[in-house]
Image (cartoon, coloured by chain):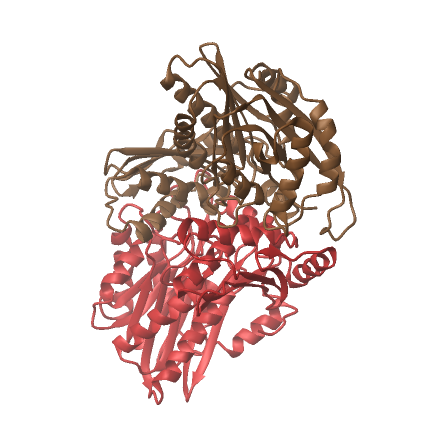
Chain colours: A red, B brown
Amino acid sequence: MEYYESEAQYLKDLDKRSGLPEGFLVSTAFVNFIPGEKPVVEKLSMNLTLIKLKEPSECFGAVYTKNAFPGAPVILGRKRLNNKFIRGILINNRIANVSARNGEEDAERILKELAELLGGSSQDYIPASTGIIGWKLPVEEIVKALPGLAVNLRGGSVLSAAKAIMTTDSFPKVRQEKVGDGTVVGIAKGAGMIEPNMGTMLAFILTDLYLDREEMRKILKKSVNRTFNRISIDGDQSTSDTAVIVSSGKKKTADFSEVERAVEEVCRKLAEDIVRNGEGVGHVMEVAVKRAPSEEVAVNIGKAVINSPLVKTAVFGNDPNVGRLLSSVGDYCGTNVPELSLRNLRINLGGIEVFSDRFFRLDTEKERRLADYLKNCGFNPALHGYPVHDKKVEIVIDLGEGTENAKVLGSDLSYQYVKENADYRS
Amino acid sequence: MEYYESEAQYLKDLDKRSGLPEGFLVSTAFVNFIPGEKPVVEKLSMNLTLIKLKEPSECFGAVYTKNAFPGAPVILGRKRLNNKFIRGILINNRIANVSARNGEEDAERILKELAELLGGSSQDYIPASTGIIGWKLPVEEIVKALPGLAVNLRGGSVLSAAKAIMTTDSFPKVRQEKVGDGTVVGIAKGAGMIEPNMGTMLAFILTDLYLDREEMRKILKKSVNRTFNRISIDGDQSTSDTAVIVSSGKKKTADFSEVERAVEEVCRKLAEDIVRNGEGVGHVMEVAVKRAPSEEVAVNIGKAVINSPLVKTAVFGNDPNVGRLLSSVGDYCGTNVPELSLRNLRINLGGIEVFSDRFFRLDTEKERRLADYLKNCGFNPALHGYPVHDKKVEIVIDLGEGTENAKVLGSDLSYQYVKENADYRS
């Protein structure tokens, strides 16, 4: 990633990579409504985003949250995976439409109205919602905004959609890869309740490269598993995690593996963007677990470290409290893989060895270097609008007990995180 | 618990329940030292606490952390469980003596010097340490302070020990139960890195009631499992969790089950004290999981809710964002017990039903009552010295799918928590 000094500079860069693949149009609209649950009578705003295929496509797929209380759009979207084709995706932010009475009927009603404007039936459109759990969608207000949405459909750029799907995200996220004369472009939304299991909060991958449905779904599943499923902001898997992929099939695919690589790359970069945009993130952390007996153990140890509130707060405070790294590895291993030998464990922070041969390797000089390293990797979590730089706090946990490796990405825990989440609905 | 308006009032109450059982003496001392690892040359202070039996006792037991990197005192303490008797316990705060080079030798050296002053061998004394992980104990400074510690041994009250074992604890914790003419008294230390597995950071239960060694160990294990193992501040199981029980055997035990009840009650109240004293705690939360298919599922769902950063921050902000309660239940169940039906799930917050028959039951009036309820349960997390009141945020998760129940206790996530843990070592 480049270094950005202003939001304008960042948006200029995004603009370059926001080109829509052939065969797609997008549109956004703005809705004001008074929620029926909020104790203070106050208007809230909601964005609608429509991604429309010029022609119906059979080539689409999605992976969804494993949360036992999926939102209504997740329930409906799962069913639509069996349909012959889709014509588009309708997304709203602000209210996630989860376990609200008549949530499924509400979503279907809206899609039915949309289909009357754009053709086909409600079945041809995939719904996606993000935001507050438990409240109802303002159905009438959304229906009223649909004609405007239909009229404004445009090709060219996906950037307006990337902006409109945000909730507490501080910057829009777009990533693009070229394969031959085709394009894979992805947008994502997500800043909190992030430990995806199947996809992040919302991600949409669009391409004009032809892939048959089964190939496409296999690629998406594999890519999601290696990218979105390896990040965590707060360990909370949401009710709405959704990653959708759609191809317009307009371009011939010369090299299947190149498309596979491009999709994974777009997912990886979006996943990194999501972490860098986590609520109140002051440091991005990358934990590389090496020489583990299995990939599962590697991922789980990485997650244990990256999700430890004590590791996260220490990094936020630029305090190289490496005892907490060891403690979180030991906590996970002692409880879950007590048979695993940890005699060969080495821990490095920012390339500096802090633990090896069963003991800490610390002195005043090293403590000073470690603190400087953390300071240098940080940025101001209150800053909004654009990611400043792409530095990461690099933690290496080398188990020396196998051949499997995994990297997980996460963030520190700041005042700003507490602030944003303490009054999320206000 | 009573309501306290000042630290003096609280200490007066503690004093009443701090009477040492027969056969015990305690002593504390203060040590200044310059750590060999801290980048800034600066004196730190450490407290030493000695709990001494007047006569060696065969009746003792302990449960320790399952962390794969236990501290040196845990390693040595575990071995001493096979010894014929003990003469005392030596505790230090500030440095946990975990994975520091020569940590075991250092602890043994200190106990050897202690034994020369007090009789017996180093094997007759159990060590316990709490504080920073990875740094070395200041052995020479501790050894110099031991004669003072030996000279000051006194009976009467355990309160000085309860104060001396604290680190970031904001108030001392003592609980007592009477059984016949005997006493069970416990002290505990713990405010962060709290999701005990075998005991909290440090807890010491002393009694004059005779129990044979095996009975005593059985009681401790069961009590710890039902009390300390059902609390969580931040989900981090420390390297030093220790609960020790010792009897002087001076009083006859008329009713074994009464002693069992008393030990569990002391552990339960200390566990509650620890949560109420959690770092930066503004609300104590109690999650009661009812009608679960197994006790394990009940405990795990409770822990999932109580450890969700999003639930914790919402409660801190007095925001009844009950969608997050559902999401954390669904996150745990979807991933771990996907076969469990949740059709009968009911969720109550402060006695107010928010979810039943598969949907949220929310309106503006209810949202207002819920917000008022949360406000009323809170206190100022920056307040130090004493617990103000014993209110809890009561969350009921009724699964309606079985007969097993469990309660877990935890806390919100505040700015103060982040602050204390961002500069813990400064």
Looking at the image, which is closer to me, B41 or A338?
A338
Q: Quadrant of residue B292?
A: top left
Looking at the image, which is closer to me, B260 or B373?
B260
Report x, y in % for residue B416.
61, 40
Q: Quadrant of residue A254?
A: bottom left
Q: Quadrant of the N terminus of chain A?
A: bottom right
Q: Quadrant of residue B215?
A: top left
Residue drawn where x is 36% and y is 19% of the image:
B257
**Residue A420 is at least partly visible in this image:** no
- Residue B255's place in the image compared with A180, above or below, is above
Report x, y in % for residue B426.
70, 46
Report x, y in % for residue B279.
58, 38
Looking at the image, which is closer to me, A341 or B79?
B79
Q: Residue furthest right?
A: B41
- Residue B273's place in the image compared with B423, above or below, is above
**Residue B267 is at least partly visible in this image:** yes
Report x, y in % for residue A407.
48, 66
Number of numbered discs present? 0
Drawn side of residue A109 relative to residue A156, left or right: left
Residue drawn where x is 36% and y is 65% of the image:
A243
